[in-house]
Image: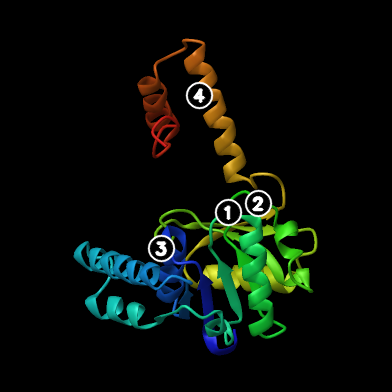
Amino acid sequence: MPHDVVAVVGSGVMGNGIAHSLAAGGFTTVLIDAVPQALERARATIEANLAEGVRRGKLQASEALAIGARISTSVDMAAAREAQLVIEAVPEEMQLKHAVFRKLEGVCSADAVFATNTSALSITEIAAAVGNPARVLGMHYFNPAHIMKLIEVVRGLQTGETAVAMALAVAQRCGKETVVINEAPGFATSRINAMIGNEAFYMLMEGVASARDIDKALKLGLNHPMGPFER
């Protein structure tokens, strides 16, 4: 991957975790947000998570320093100009995502790949913001992004194989597992979670069990990390 430069747009909970994950994979990572205070909070969060990794013996102190040093921040979208992959992690508003991708199209190279971390919006509709929708796909990370192993790689109707291949290669280098999903409402994980949540509420309404016992059943019987009523 040329220059090993990637960018993340949006420095909230998901954005800073994605940036952390990419830097841990060895990528020079630019974290971009329009709000300087948001970038300060993101940097503090990343540093705290790195320190926790050292405390728990998951990282050497020198590794943590190296990861932190690979992350730079900017309020200017032009900072993504050298990136070969840009991951958007702004709030789930289609107009905002369209604005981000139009700006990226104006500053990035023609062969740069654009990914969105959306968990529910249409990849195809997001990709309509740019002239070449083949360069756009979904990379759905899970919270906390620097720890959770899975990335859903989601194809829009016009997503090209080059974009998919780059997303898979980046994920692999960062130590992630991937599944490739053809666009559908909720993709795979959100769709299943919605079904589980709905069924849990039906069970509660029908008096099958208490919320506490439904949660306990799913955690101990099906090995879910948390129950639907705890979310």
Camera-side mark, 4 or 1: 1
Report the residue at 59% width, 84% height from top.
Answer: 1
Three-letter code for the amino acid on which mark 3 is drawn: His
User: Are circles 4 and 1 on residues that touch, CB within 8 Å?
Assistant: no
- Residues under labels 3 and 1: Cα distance? 20 Å
- The answer to whether one can see residue 214 in this image is yes
Q: Name the mark on residue 200.
A: 4
Helix, strand, or loop for circle 1? Answer: loop
Helix, strand, or loop for circle 3? Answer: loop
User: Are circles 2 and 1 on residues that touch, CB within 8 Å?
Assistant: yes
Camera-side mark, 3 or 1: 1
- Residue underneath mark 2: 121
Query: How far across and how far down the image is residue 93, in percent?
Result: 61, 55
Report the residue at 63% width, 45% height from top.
Answer: 188
Query: How far across and how far down the image is residue 29, in percent?
Result: 46, 79
Report the residue at 37% width, 30% height from top.
Answer: 220
- Residues under labels 3 and 4: Cα distance? 29 Å
Query: How far across and how far down the image is residue 70, in percent?
Result: 39, 82
Q: Quadrant of residue 12?
A: bottom left
Q: Name the mark on residue 92.
A: 1
Three-letter code for the amino acid on which mark 2 is drawn: Leu
Nearest the eye: 161 or 46:
46
